[in-house]
Image (cartoon, rainbow, N blue to C red):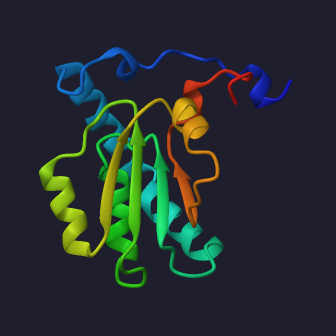
Amino acid sequence: MSGLEQRQLEPEILDGLAGDDPRALAARRDLRRINALMFQARIMASLLWKFVPRPPRRILEIGAGDGSFMLAIARRMAGHWPGVQLVMLDRVDLITAQLQGDFDRLGWTVEGVTADVFDWARKNEGTRFDAITVNLFLHHFDDAEL
């Protein structure tokens, strides 16, 4: 039996909580810790560097959360990738003025989109991006949805 056959789909606590709920704040803090412990930003930055052939104009981040993951990547990449337009897609709007300012200082522009990923994809079919990133996200969906 493969790992995918053994996969268990569990609802995530963040799916049903308001953005400012203390449990949501704690869960996002835990996700930031997991990303740090697993060196996720370093790994993603190196993958983007390797597989995106030129500095991208537009990047879509699916499941952007509070934006801290992509901000860590932007801090690594902004010197080589100036002027990126970043679309941050999530079910909950968590883009703060502080986050916006952090990206602005790096020379990246941010558009926050609050939507279900499947609804957004249907409405934006044909929209082009130079890179699409996803981190700690696919576990939300069953096989049929994937």
Q: Is residue 79 visible?
A: yes
Is 142 above or below relative to 93? Answer: above
Taking 107 as reference, is 131 left or right?
right
* Figure quadrant of the C terminus: top right
The residue at the point 54 percent across, 15 percent down is 10
The residue at the point 64 percent across, 52 percent down is 126
Is 6 above or below relative to 76? Answer: above
| Quarter of image, res 93 | top left
Taking 57 as reference, is 64 left or right?
left
* Image location (x, y in percent) of residue 14: 36, 23
* Figure quadrant of the N terminus: top right
Taking 91 as reference, is 57 left or right?
right
Taking 27 as reference, is 39 left or right?
right
Q: Is residue 39 visible?
A: no
Is 60 above or below relative to 117? Answer: below
The residue at the point 25 percent across, 39 percent down is 94
